[in-house]
Structure formats: structure tokens, C-alpha cells
Amino acid sequence: MNRTEARKLAKELVSKMTLDEKLSQLKHYAEPVERLGVPRYNWWNEALHGVARAGTATVFPQAIGLAASFDEDFQRTIGDTVATEGRAKFNMFIEQNDREIYKGLTYWSPNINIFRDPRWGRGHETYGEDPFLTARMGIAYVKGLQGDGEYMKTAACAKHYAVHSGPEATRHEVDVRPSDYDLWDTYLPAFEAVVKEGGVEAIMGAYNRVNGEPCCGSNMLIRDVLRGKWGFEGHFVSDCWAIEDFHVNHKVTDTAPESAAMALKAGCDINCGVTYLHLKQAYLDGLVTEEEIDASVIRAMTARYLLGLFDENCEYNSIGYEQNDSAENNALALKAAHKTMVLLKNDGILPLNREKIKSIAVIGPNADSILALEGNYCGTSSRYKTFLAGIRDACGDDIRVNYAQGAHLFSNRTVDILGPEGDRLSEARAAAKNSDVVVLCVGLDATLEGEQGDASNAFAAGDKLTLELPESQIRLIKAVVAMGKPVITVVAAGSALRVEEGNAVLWVGYPGQAGGTALADILFGKVNPSGKLPVTFYRTADDLPPIEDYTMQNRTYRYYKGEALYPFGFGMSYTKYDYSDLVYDADKRELTVTVRNVGNVAGEESVQAYIRDMDTNSHDLNWSLCAFKCVALQPGEEKRVALSVGENAFTTVDDAGIRAKRGSHFRFWVGGSQPDSVSCKLVGKAPLSVDVEC
């Protein structure tokens, strides 16, 4: 069903509703209109990396890990699988007449905010720091969720629009005032892309203000840009209780009816929260018209028609319960976890030679932690495999596994009551002493980095204060390293941390239900690591502007002037890849390059292309990712890889926020990393480059 047909049906239906019936459709818990055959519907559902908060479902790697795959096609497959499980669960719920929260088909995912500062607690929900990577992964996930059938399989919702990335503690009252340059160069491009190319059905507004206007009531963001400039025709939903912030925290209105009216008139259709209970009073006070109410209800009902919710013969109604939490989906989650993990350091210890190992120590607070697999906004898996369990399975009866928790995840007075850290350090030393090699599982989980109110670190409201591990884990690392055994440090976290200790370092994100099996596969060489960092790992947060400052100057690989610890786009492998014969075809706007696996191990390589306008100094912009493709190569195999370069790659944004082509001399770099000095040093060579005039 196309939008024109769905809108026509929605308009006819809404014309038969009373004012009160219309108003009842604009809360996230829409009431039934039984006389018109409209059932109850709850708009609030989540699917950030799997169907979330609705019971058993496959838990894929957290979004930041999926970004590390640099693989659009695979990302779309994940989205399609999530949508299948969503339909399976929806059909099951409908059979039981369960239409409550987290039971619908409108998924408030993906999060395409830019992870501009590594201290932001919710950054692991995103696809990283780069607008282009974020846009491509966002489009792929949206298309996967929505499908290409007669109806939408599920409805995706891109959030949080716009200029939203911490601090968590002030998100309900802060007024963010980005420069026009940063607004249009960094913060809006991914949203524009998922609207224009991705066809996303919904957009969620952020809590904060932008240039004085609350995002969920912003004429500039919603009316002028989203619906006007970009032609968005879907529905707009507020973040939860964000409209209440208008009068409670932002103080831009005095009453709830005024807040409801401001949001509705700007184009916010669905209120997650209760402020739209005051729309009737706003109407009686003359603050909104029935025509304005109709416009939002029609958009809401259009979405329900597009989902086939009024068609008993909808093609997705036959998806059965058995298609949720299946063995096939678990295999896909394992493959995703393989692609998530990024090898940052390796002195040759990896892959482990099981013939030379009789015992292995698995130590750390994340070693046997399910939370270290999940991230936030997740479902509940029936198939969790912790790092300890995965390694133990791989070792079988041949290699002894010595386990020690070693430390609490973090230390405070409440945690210390559980037992003295010294006892755990003693056991960690003993485990290391009696083993040939140590796998040290450190990092964070969503109780430390996450959303305000969800995370346990009330001292930072979910954000991080530094890039260091908690003190308890720093003590553990020092104690274990001092034992003199080979150490492989495994960092489970959704953000950048300064971790250098160990003979090898693996960043695994939050790898999902199969994380333990995936880790063991990589440690023992069954799988070659292929992940690439979607964020910059800095040496210290002191090198960055304050988190409250939304300038992009000296942030992310595009503007950072220092030397990173581990750069954006970097990730090691057990093999080596050679690049040759780089050519740019101006007529096709296409780069082609030959990539050859010159090692003796099969692997996947994320081929990355970066561009810079050599004629234009655009706010000291270094270079920007403009294309990427994941290619699988057997030992000795080579492939000719084609990379399409979008028209926007040749443009820059000026101080007024206008994007245009300005220069005529451009330089491309193509390789397995960006062309920064640290990547070149770590990889041992620079990417290929070619200069073009166009």
C-alpha cells in the first residue's frame, strides 16, 4: 500500500471521529474507537539491536558494535531479522488480545545521533562519530525494519532529532546553540539521509532545546526543515515526557495546555507521555484548531494503515511464533558478534595456539557477566553465552580454565559491603599464576554508561567523567600484569576507553547473546577479527572541549588535531591486505581498487574511502569518510572493489549552513583505515591516494 492510498483511507476514517476520539489517538497509548473498528494501540516499542523489552528475543550486538562491521548489507539483514521477530511476537500478542506497551509495531529505533564526545553515556546506542557512517548504517537498518512488501513490516523511527548527545544530567533543560556550520555539517545530515533515502516512517524529537526552541515543538526543526525542506510525510513522536519539559524545565510555556498546543502546532503528532491529555483544554482556549488536530491524527492513522493493521490478510500475519528466538537467528547473532569485535593491539600472541596451552585464566568483572553482552534497550535472550562460558566451551576437556572475578565493576561504599577488593585480587593473582595465559575481561556495562535514570552512576547521570576504567579495575589490571604472564585484555564497553595494557587488546562493544562464543572463536583463530572502530579512542578527555560544548572543533577524527590512541576506522587482522591500482571514474563517480589477501588466513576487510576538498579550508576539516564496503577474501584471493561516491562528498558547508560544491581539486584516500599518522604507523603503510579535478 502506498502512502497516498493509506492517507486517503486515514482521512476518511478520521472524518468519522468525534473530537474526543481524535484526541484519544495522539497519546502513545491510543484508545480504541470500537464503533469504527479501531482497536487499542500502544505506539511505544523499542528495537535498537533486537526486539526490546517484550520478553524473549534474539539480542544482537549493541548498535555501536554493528557500526564496527562497516557493512551496510549485513546491517539491513539484521534489521529484517529483527522485524521478523517483531511480527512473530506481535502476532502472538494479538492472539491473546495483549495490546499494551512494547507490543506494537512502531519501533523507536535507530538512534542516529552523533557520538561526538566519548563521555556521553548513550553513545553506544548510536553508530558512532561520523555523519556518513551513521547515515549509511541508519538507512540500512530502517530499510531492514520496514521491508519492501505490500505493507511495512514494522515502522522505524529515527531519533533523537536533533543536536542531542549529552550531558545526560541537563538534557531536560539545556538550550543547545550549535553554529550553523556544525548543525548542517554534523548534526543533521544523517536525519536528512534516513528521510530522503531511507524512507523512515517516524522521527522522534529530543528533550533539549535548539536555539531556544524545544525540539518537540520547534518550528525550525519540524515544520521548516523536516517537513518543509526535506519533504517528510511520516509521523513525529515526542521523546517520553519531553513536552512536559516545555513548562516544567525549559520554561518556554506556563501551562500544560500551552505546551501541548506548541508541540501540536509545530507538527508533533504522538505524545509519549500525558501532556496531550490537555489538548482538549488547548482547543477550548483557542490555542489549537480542529484542523491542526486532524492533521496529526491523519498522519498517525496513515502509519497504521501502512502497517496493514486494518487488513486481516496482511502478508505478515502468517509469521509464526517459531520465527522468534530461532537457531538461525542465533547463528546470525554470532556472525554479528564476530564482525563487532575490533583487535586494537597484538604483539603476536593472537591467535592462541591451543596445542601450546594447558591452562587459561579468565579474569575480570565482565568475564561472566550477561550485562556485558547486552548494552541497553535490549530484549531477553534464552541463549546467552558469557565470555567465560564461551572460552570454557572452546577449551573443552583439553585446557583447564581458571576463573576469578578479580574486582567489582566499580567501587563505592555500597559495593564494598559485598566484600573486600583484596580478596578478589588475591584470587586473580592465583588464577594468573597457575595459567599459561590470561584473558582479562574489563570494561563497563549499561549500569555505568547509559541513559539518565537507567544507569546506576548517579554521580554522572549515565555519562563518564574520564576515559579511564574504574579504579577497581585499574587495580586489577596492575595486579594481573605484574604476574608476568601473557595477557589478552578484552574491553566490553560501548565507548572509547584508554586501555593499553596487555599483549593484545580487543574492544568487543556489547556483543549480544553470542558474545562469549564469538570471543573464543577469535581468540583461538577460528574466526579472523574484522571490526573497525566507529569512534576515536583518545588518550585523555583533557584533549577534548567540555562535553557541554557542542562545537565540533577538535572533536572526532574529522577535526581532531592530536594523535589518537586508536583511530576511527582502525582495526587489526590475522592477515594482511594489499591495495593497488586505485582509479576514479568521474562519469560514474566511482572509485575502484584491487584488494588482495596476502596472508594465509581468510578474512573480511572493510575498504574505506576518504575525501578532502584541497581548495577549501572548511573549519580545519581533515578529511571525511565518503564510501566503504566489506569484502571477504580467501588467502591469496584478490577482488576489484567498486565504491560509489555520493554527490554530497564533493560539497562543503559554509558559515551560514549552506552546503555546496566549492573546490575543484579533491584528494581520495582508499585503504583499510583513514590516512592519519597513527593509523599509518599502526598499519605500517598509508592508504592509496589519488587526486582528481572535477
Image: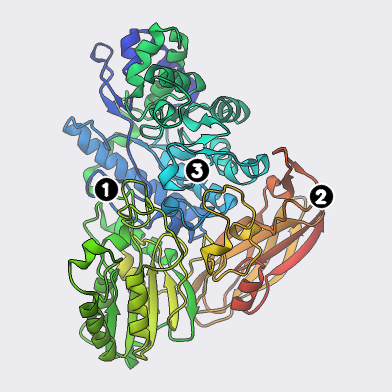
Check disc 2 and report the residue beneath it.
663
* Residue 465 appearing in the image: yes
Mark nearest the camera among 1 and 3 is 3
Residue 447's spot in the image, x, y percent? 31, 56
Per the model, the C-alpha gap separating discs 1 and 2 is 52 Å
Can you say whether 265 is above or below 108 in the image? above
In the picture provided, is 560 more to the left or to the right than 81? right
Check disc 3 and report the residue beneath it.
164
Work out which quarter of the rendered image holds the N terminus and state it.
top left
Can you say whether 658 is above or below 262 in the image? below
Tell me what residue is drawn at x 58 percent, y 36 percent.
196
- Disc 1 residue type? Gln
SS under mark 2: loop
Considering only order in the chain, which callout, 3 or 2, is on the residue closer to the N terminus? 3
In the picture provided, is 656 more to the left or to the right than 683? right
Q: Which mark is residue 272?
A: none
- Disc 3 residue type? His
Residue 370's spot in the image, x, y percent? 26, 62
Mark nearest the camera among 1 and 2 is 2
Residue 385's spot in the image, x, y percent? 26, 66
Tell me what residue is drawn at x 41 percent, y 59 percent.
494
Circle 1 crowding by C-alpha within 10 Å: few under 14, some 14–19, many from 20 = some
Circle 2 crowding by C-alpha within 10 Å: few under 14, some 14–19, many from 20 = some
- Disc 2 residue type? Gly
Considering only order in the chain, which callout, 3 or 1, is on the residue closer to the N terminus? 3
Check disc 1 and report the residue beneath it.
323
Query: Which residue is situated farthest in the front direction here?
Result: 413
SS under mark 3: loop
